[in-house]
Image (spheres, helix red, strand yellow):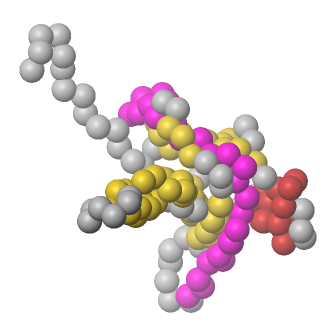
């Protein structure tokens, strides 16, 4: 190890916040789908007997947010815009911000032109005592890690 460097502990995945169009939302239980990939396209050049791998289309998975249901209906209203055919108005940018142990911003991912493609309501069970969870999937056109 070089002089002056110290090991840094990795950040924990349980402290985070979501912002959609600059509006902070709290109380999310889980965020998933932060992934980006590029297709590999096979290309045969001339009469050679080997295949070149070229970069194809960029793809981004849907971001999935899960939270306990409260009386806040902002995400449902956002989904309703899409169901009413107002997709252009529904597109929003957002951030997923990972916080360190002291609550400071440690890492941030931004998505662009996101819109809720799917909403899933809770499962009810009279014999259970879990929190009622709803899930929203956000399709988007780009993901960047900015911090």
User: Which of the 4 quarters of the picture holds residue 72?
Assistant: bottom right
Q: What residue is at 38 percent from the left and 60 percent from the top?
A: 46
**In this view of the protein, which residue sits in the foreground, 110 or 51?**
51
Image coordinates of residue 143 in percent, x first then y, are 56, 46
Q: What residue is at 72 percent from the left and 49 percent from the top?
A: 113
Q: Is residue 103 above or below residue 115?
A: above
User: Which of the 4 quarters of the picture holds residue 68?
Assistant: bottom right
Visible in this render: residue 77?
A: no
Q: What residue is at 12 percent from the left and 10 percent from the top?
A: 3
Magenta residues, start to end: 100-125
Image coordinates of residue 13 in percent, x first then y, are 39, 48
Is 8 left or right of 91, judged from the image as shown?
left
Name of the residue lying farthest toward the top: 4
Is 69 left or right of 81, judged from the image as shown?
left
Q: Does the magenta stretch include residue 124?
A: yes
**In this view of the protein, which residue sits in the foreground, 97 or 139?**
139
Q: In this view, does 103 lie above or below 65?
A: above
Q: What residue is at 68 percent from the left and 72 percent from the top?
A: 119
Per the picture, the main secondary structure of the magenta-coloured stretch is strand
**In this view of the protein, which residue sits in the foreground, 67 or 86?**
86
Is 21 left or right of 48, judged from the image as shown?
right
Image coordinates of residue 73 in percent, x first then y, are 78, 61
Image coordinates of residue 1 in percent, x first then y, are 9, 20
Name of the residue lying farthest toward the left: 1
**In this view of the protein, which residue sits in the foreground, 5 or 37?**
37
- How many circles with numbers are drawn on the protein? 0
Q: Is residue 46 above or below residue 99?
A: below
Name of the residue lying farthest toward the front: 47
Q: Is residue 1 magenta?
A: no
Visible in this render: residue 10?
A: yes
């Amino acid at each position: 190890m070089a002089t002056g460097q110290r090991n840094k502990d990795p950040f924990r995945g349980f402290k985070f916040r979501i912002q959609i169009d600059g509006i902070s939302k709290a109380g999310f239980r889980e965020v998933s789908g932060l992934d980006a990939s590029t297709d590999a396209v096979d290309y045969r050049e001339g009469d050679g007997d080997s295949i070149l791998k070229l970069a194809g289309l960029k793809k981004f998975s849907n971001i999935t947010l899960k939270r306990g249901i409260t009386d806040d209906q902002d995400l449902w209203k956002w989904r309703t815009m899409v169901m009413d055919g107002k997709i252009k108005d529904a597109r929003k940018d957002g951030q997923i911000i990972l916080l360190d142990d002291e609550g400071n911003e440690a890492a941030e991912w931004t998505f662009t032109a996101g819109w809720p493609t799917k909403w899933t309501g809770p499962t009810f069970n009279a014999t259970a005592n879990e929190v009622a969870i709803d899930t929203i999937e956000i399709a988007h056109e780009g993901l960047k890690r900015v911090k």
